[in-house]
Every structure is written in structure tokens, then in C-alpha cells.
Image: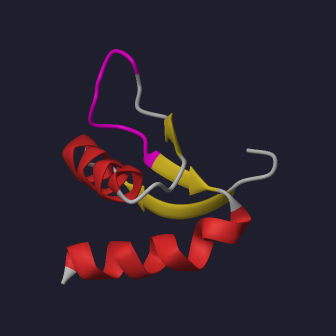
Amino acid sequence: MEGKKSVYTTTEEYKALLIQGALESVGIEVVLLNQHDSTINTFGQLELFVRPDQYDEALAIIEQNNS
């Protein structure tokens, strides 16, 4: 993902969507890369990417949401 930094990885879609929503609600641009197998949704990862200048803020928000 050129020009973006990976900020969160999970295998559970609901977690990725919750974090994505939390980040977007404060104006952080998020790209969700879904690498789940299309036939069996239990294999693969979901990864969230943000702009490098928003990386530290995104990490802080993720920490708040995971505690």
C-alpha cells in the first residue's frame, strides 16, 4: 500500500470495522485491505492503513479502543 502505513491487523472483520469507524470519526483517512479467502471467511487477515502523518494519532485511538 504505497504512501500508507499499516496501523492495525486482525483476522476478525468486526474488529477491523470498529477500529476503522473510530478512526474515521475523528477524521483519519483509513484504507481497509481485506485478505480473507472469498470462499472461507475464516482464513486471511484484514489490515488497516493510514497516512504516515496520521499514524501516531491512529495508534493512540486504537489503544484507547482496545483497553
For this rendering, which residue is in front, 18 or 53? 53
Which quadrant does the N terminus fall into?
Answer: top right
Residue located farthest toward the top when viewing the structure as drawn: 39
- Residue beneath the point at 46% across and 62% down: 8
Q: Provide residue 24's location: percent of width, then percent of height.
A: 40, 50
Q: In the figure, is residue 15 to the left or right of 3?
A: left
Q: Magenta stretch: dominant SS?
A: loop
- In front of the other: 40 or 6: 6
What's the magenta region? 38-46
Residue at the location (44% across, 58% down)? 9
* Residue 2 vertical position relative to residue 5 in the rendered view, above or below: above
The quadrant of the picture occupied by the C terminus is bottom left
Which residue is depicted at the point 22% across and 76% down? 66
Q: Nearer the viewer, residue 40 or 56?
A: 56
Q: Is residue 56 magenta?
A: no
**Side (left or right) of 3 relative to 26:** right
Looking at the rendering, which quadrant does residue 13 occupy?
top left
* Residue that appears at 49% across and 50% down: 47
Q: Is residue 4 left or right of residue 8?
A: right
* Tally of numbered discs: 0
Residue 2 located left or right of residue 65: right
Instruction: Name the residue at the right extreme.
Output: 2
Is 43 contained in the magenta span?
Answer: yes
Q: Where residue 36 appears, x then y in whole percent?
A: 41, 32
